[in-house]
Amino acid sequence: MKFTLSKSILAGLMLPAAKAVPKKTALPILESLHIESDGKTITVTGSDQDLTIRTRAEFDEPQKEAKGAVCVPAYVLVDLIANLDGKTVVTFETTGTSTISCRWDGGECSLPTFEAKDYPDTAFKDEVTMRTTIVPAELASLLHNASYAADAVNDLKPVLASVLLRSSADAKTLTAVASDSHVLAVAVAPTSDDEGDISGETLIPRRSAEILEKFLPTKEETPAVLEATPSGIRVSVGTLSLQCRATIGKFVDYEKIIPKEAPNVLTVDTETLASALKIIATCASALHPGIVITTNALTGTQLEGEDTTRGTRARQEVTGSYEGQEGFQICVPADRLLDAVAHLGSEQVTLSFTDPRRAVAVRPFGYEGPGEPCALVMPIVQKAAETKSE
């Protein structure tokens, strides 16, 4: 096997695929990149068996000697390419059964190789049960605005460490939903008009969703194709492809949880609210980061937080419009509410309150896009101090 490529093309092939390569694994060959060519194109695959990233490039001219497949240690190869000069052209040639030589102007090195036949089969199989086409930037934004609400890791309840993706071919929307049981995020994005789209839903692990978000070429206008089977998910954009295992489980019926109407509604500038939350959080307890929100149509809205162990306390007034019960009060975790407000991405937000023991519904004010994006933030229920009778 012998082929020649420039550093820029090599970097475009190797660096994305290497993001799926594990640093430690019980299967040593997975620490390698699988490189395969038919003489016209070259394909590079990196995988930890849960997540697989595949890149592809065409040769400027057919390279007959390039036909074949080989596995090369990923991190050595990536470091080598990163340190070469930007205009360097590299020739790779397998020598024997366990070595590949790399030659460039003024230098060369040799790297160990492994049999390509020993690399696990990462082909995308099973019948596709969901398919949608969407602009990469829209998909990246969708994942960003929902995945933060999922657990980083939850071995007991994997669904809580995943993002629900639900596509509607009729409404031409893709909805992402995530929850760790303390906060729930719903984001919606428009999809492209494609006759091959299939309505359905799937669960993508949060780690895979975050890697996919960074992996997507957001400046690319070519639609990304998202496909799912009962066991896997694949997203393809041009010559790039990412696939991962789907989480097996059933997501909660989130639509029943979201309150449609609330008696108390506060509309406030997003930047003003975010600033106030950050200020109050500095004086709130790190172990109990609750912020008390008190609403009043006459005196305005106040945010308060304190830490009795440090003797710190802060109060901040927030200008906004409020309709509802006078003096309504609720305690919410500052970090959760701040995340929700930041990820909605609107200039103003509405906070809907039903009861001090029920979730706060946060929505973008004046939203005119598809669906109904929102976030639910569970409150911190404050118990009244008990008094003992003498």
Image (cartoon, rainbow, N blue to C red):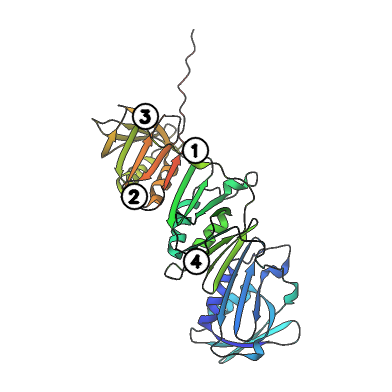
Q: Amino acid at mark 4?
A: Ala
- Residue 208 vs residue 173, the one in the foreground: 173
Res. 282 visible in picture: no
Q: Earlier in the sequence, mark 2 or mark 4?
A: 4
Residue 256's disc number: 1
Q: Amino acid at mark 3?
A: Gln
Dot 2 crowding, Cα within 10 Å, few <14, some 14–19, many 20+: few
Q: Earlier in the sequence, mark 3 or mark 1?
A: 1
Q: Is residue 171 above or below residue 156?
A: below
Q: Earlier in the sequence, mark 4 or mark 1?
A: 4
What residue does disc 2 label? 367
> Between marks 2 and 4, how big is the CA–CA gap?
25 Å
Q: Earlier in the sequence, mark 2 or mark 1?
A: 1
Q: Secondary structure at mark 1?
A: helix
- Residue 44 vs residue 30, the one in the foreground: 44
The number of numbered badges drawn on the structure is 4
At which x and y percent is residue 336? 45, 43
